[in-house]
Image (cartoon, rainbow, N blue to C red):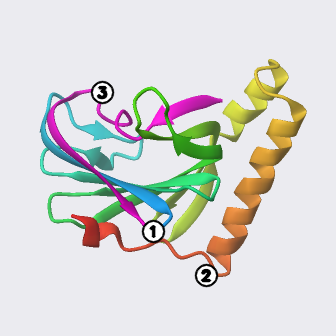
Amino acid sequence: MRKRLLTKKYLRDVKEYIIKIAKDNDAYVCVKEIIDIEKPFSIPTGLCLVNNGYHIVEILPMNEKFCVRTFLNEKNEILQKYIDVSLGNGIDEETNIPYYDDIFLDIIINNDEIYVDDKDELEKAYKNNEITEKTYNEANIICNQILSELNTNKYIIKDVREYL
C-alpha cells in the first residue's frame, strides 16, 4: 500500500506544469496541465498519455475508495481513464494535499473497454506479507464493486473537460 499525493503522480519527466486543486462537493479535483516535458510518456500499446499541451484530471471522492484519473491530449480529447482502487482517501496532515492509499489494483478504461490491471502486484504484495489477507480481500471487493457499477452504467464518471 502506498500513499499517493495528487500533486505528485505522472510528473516524473515533466519540466514545467501548472496544477490546480479545487473542491467540488465531496471530491477534490486536481488538474495538471503539461507545459514542457523531457520525454513523452506512452503506455506499451504506443498510446501517448503525457506530453506537451496535455492534461491530467484527477477526481478524488472523499467518501469512496478510489481515485479517477483522466488523460486528455492537446485537443482535450479523452485518451484513457484510470481508476486507482484505494483503502481510503484523505488530506495529508503535513502538506494539506489530498491523497489516496493505493492498494495496487487498478481499472483502466480505453475506448469503452474496461479491464483490471496490476492483479499480479496485489498477489505479490499479499504473498510477500506486504499486505494482510483482509487488505487483499478488501481490494478485490472494492474492485468488483466498481466493475459492477461500470458494467451496469450505474457508475458515472464525469466529463472532466468542464474543469479545464
Q: Position of residue 34 (x, y in %)?
A: 17, 44
Q: Would you name the residue on which mark 2 appears? A: 153
Instruction: Count neighbours of disc 1 (C-alpha within 10 A) and say few if under 14, some if 14 to 19, many if 20 or more.
Output: few
| Three-letter residue code for mark 3 | Arg
- Element type where label 3 sits in the image: loop
Residue visible at 60% across and 75% down?
A: 155
Report, in whole angstroms, how far the alpha carbon at label 1 lies from the one at label 2: 22 Å
Q: Would you name the residue on which mark 3 appears? A: 12
Residue 130, label in figure:
none
- Element type where label 1 sits in the image: loop
Instruction: Count neighbours of disc 2 (C-alpha within 10 A) and say few if under 14, some if 14 to 19, many if 20 or more.
Output: few
- What kind of secondary structure does the magenta stretch mostly adopt? strand
| Three-letter residue code for mark 1 | Asn
Instruction: Count neighbours of disc 3 (C-alpha within 10 A) and say few if under 14, some if 14 to 19, many if 20 or more.
Output: few
Pointer 2 or 3: first along the chain: 3
Pointer 1 or 3: first along the chain: 3
Report, in whole angstroms, how far the alpha carbon at label 2 lies from the one at label 3: 34 Å
- Residue 20 located left or right of residue 30: left
Q: Judge whether residue 6 is colored magenta.
A: yes
Pointer 1 or 2: first along the chain: 1
Q: Is label 1 in contact with label 3 (beta carbons under 8 Å)?
A: no
Nearer the observer, 73 or 64: 64
Determine which quarter of the picture holds residue 161: bottom left
| Three-letter residue code for mark 2 | Asn
What range is drawn magenta here? 1-24
Residue visible at 30% across and 27% down?
A: 12
- Element type where label 2 sits in the image: loop
Determine which quarter of the picture holds residue 25: bottom left
Residue 25, label in figure:
1
